[in-house]
Amino acid sequence: MNNLFDMTKKELQTFLVAQGMKKFRADQIFHYVYKENIFSWDEMVLLPKKDRQLLKDVLPIHFPEIVSRLDAPDGQTVKLLLQLADGETVETVLMMHDYGNSICVSSQVGCAVNCAFCASAKNGFVRNLSAGEMVAQLLAFRKYVTPELHSIVIMGTGEPLLNYDNVIRFMKLIHDKDTLYLGYRNMTLSTSGIVPKMYDLAKEGMPITLAVSLHAPNDALRRRIMPIAEKYPLEAVLQAARHYFDVTGRKVTFEYILIKGLTCTNACAKELARLLGGQNILVNAIPINDNYDVGLYRPDEKTMNEFVTYLQRHGVPVTLRREMGSKIQAACGQLRIKREKI
Ligand code: SF4
């Protein structure tokens, strides 16, 4: 099925001409969608009525519906659960930072990677999202919440590098000057470390930021919380990350989840400092939200601060992520899981 949000303007022109419509109608349609946030053929009143009627049949617009919306009490995070054309649902989160609004995009329905701390993996993998379904997550925020968009992070539900072609297409689409014209430097892709695809990404010529979920300083611990580490050992992941930096010149971010008594210990801090100290990288330390189902808990503030301070003193640039959205279940997958339980 054709999806308007999957198309470049050129592709839409070709499609319209094949339907007997004028090529320039694509300009009007793109203006409605990407400048005026209008997503209904009926409201695109500059199009002739007969064209609108035909388009309803040959190119129906499936704009995602909001199933639920959660606003954080501080007003800085909004989470939407969106329903897609086939009834599946995806989560997407808007975070309002000092430097601008950032949207966390989901790339799959469910996820096969099965990280121990992640709600998205609970019910397994369902399907890949199309590029258009990812574009529609951004458009939903523009329509329902705010038109201001500064950056995106592909860090929601799913492993983006296991939906490689659609994710690349999505980034190219929103970079296009006819759509959202978002700079590649304002895009971040987060991977659990799918090594061969990290090498492919380096070849794309798209200077996006690569974020790698490290989450543990050695293979044994990493395998306990990230089964994907069986397939892609730590050293291979680090080598692929170094290669990405060498080719693109873009500093790689390593995400590191802080779990009480497991990854946030003195021993882990020492090992991590040995692994990453003095390198041109950034570590983003993320406190886990308490997860009673799997018995993984957030460390206390003092322990987290000591962990971060140790790394800083040993040459590892690290930031402790400001909490956004933990009060509204903004960790990926939590809202979708909650709905499925109802
Ligand atoms: S953390 Fe990311 S890669 Fe891991 S299971 Fe969750 S969605 Fe998948």
Image (tube, rainbow, N blue to C red):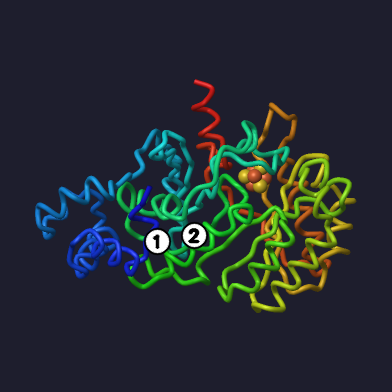
Any mark on residue 184, and which? none
Q: Which residue is at the front of the view, 170 or 252?
A: 170
Say which residue appears at 65% left-offset and 72% top-offset. Answer: 202
Rendered view: 308 above or below 293: below
Any mark on residue 149, and which? 1
Seen in the image, is 186 located left or right of residue 58?
A: right
Pointers 2 and 1 in contact (CB under 8 A)? yes
Q: Secondary structure at mark 1?
A: loop
Q: Which residue is at the front of the view, 59 or 327?
A: 59
In the rendered image, residue 258, in percent from the top left (x then y), is placed at 73, 46
Q: Residue furthest top?
A: 342
Seen in the image, is 266 located left or right of residue 104?
A: right
| CA–CA distance in space, label 2 to label 1 | 8 Å
Q: Say if disc 1 is inside 8 Å of ligand 1.
A: no
Q: Secondary structure at mark 2?
A: strand
What residue type is disc 1 on?
A: Leu
Alpha-carbon neighbours of circle 2 within 10 Å: few (<14), some, or many (≥20)?
many
Q: Which residue is at the front of the view, 105 or 93?
A: 105
Q: Residue furthest left?
A: 49
Alpha-carbon neighbours of circle 1 within 10 Å: few (<14), some, or many (≥20)?
some
Rendered view: 4 above or below 202: above
Circle 2 residue? 152
